[in-house]
Image: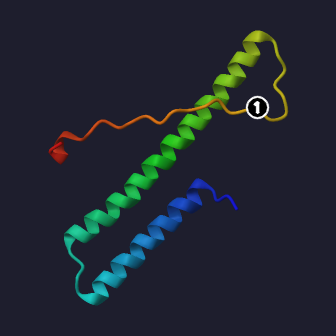
Amino acid sequence: MTTSPQERLADVAAAAVEVAVESAEAGTYTGGVGRALSAVVAKVGARLTLDAELRGFSSGWQEAVAAMSGEQPGPAPVPAPVLPLHARPDPEDGA
C-alpha cells in the first residue's frame, strides 16, 4: 500500500504530537523536546518536498526530450534515475 506524501507527513506530525503529549503527561516535556520533535517534522517535510521536486523535474525533462525529438510520449514513461543530493551542513549547527 502506497501512501501519498501528504499522508506520510500527517502521520509523522501526528506521531510527534503523541510523543509531546506523552512527554507532557510524564512531566518530562521541555523546550528541547519540542524543538527536537519539530525538527523531525521539518526534516520529513523537506525530504518529501525534495522528492516531489525531483520527480517533477524528471518527468518534465522526459516530456521535453520527447517533444524535441518528435516522439509521442508513451502511456507511462519510465522515470529517470535520480541520485540524492546531500545538504550542506548548517553553519549554525557548529558543523
In this view, 36 is above or below 15? above
Query: How are the colours assigned in the image?
Result: rainbow
Disc 1 packing (10 Å; few <14; some 14–19; many ≥20): few
Q: Disc 1 residue type?
A: Pro
Q: Residue sitting at 20 percent across and 75 percent down?
A: 30
- Quarter of the picture holding the C terminus: top left
Describe the element under mark 1 as helix, strand or loop: loop
Q: Looking at the image, which residue sits at the far top? A: 69
Identify the residue position indicated by label 1 in the image: 77
Q: Position of residue 3 (x, y in %)?
A: 64, 59
Residue 30 in the figure: left or right of residue 16: left
Q: Residue at the spot x=44%, y=54% of the render?
A: 44
Whole-percent x and y of residue 62? Answer: 69, 24
Quadrant for residue 80, please give it. top right
Task: Establish if 5 lies above or below 95.
Answer: below
User: As displayed, is residue 68 above or below residue 51?
Assistant: above
Residue at image x 38%, y 36%? 86
- Left or right: where does residue 62 sit relative to residue 10? right
Image side of residue 41 versus residue 2, left or right? left
Q: How many marks?
A: 1
Residue 32 appears in which quarter of the rendering? bottom left
The residue positioned 84% from the left and 20% from the top of the image is: 72
Q: Residue 63 appears at what percent x and percent y? A: 71, 24
In the shown orientation, is residue 72 left or right of residue 68?
Answer: right
The quadrant in which the N terminus is found is: bottom right
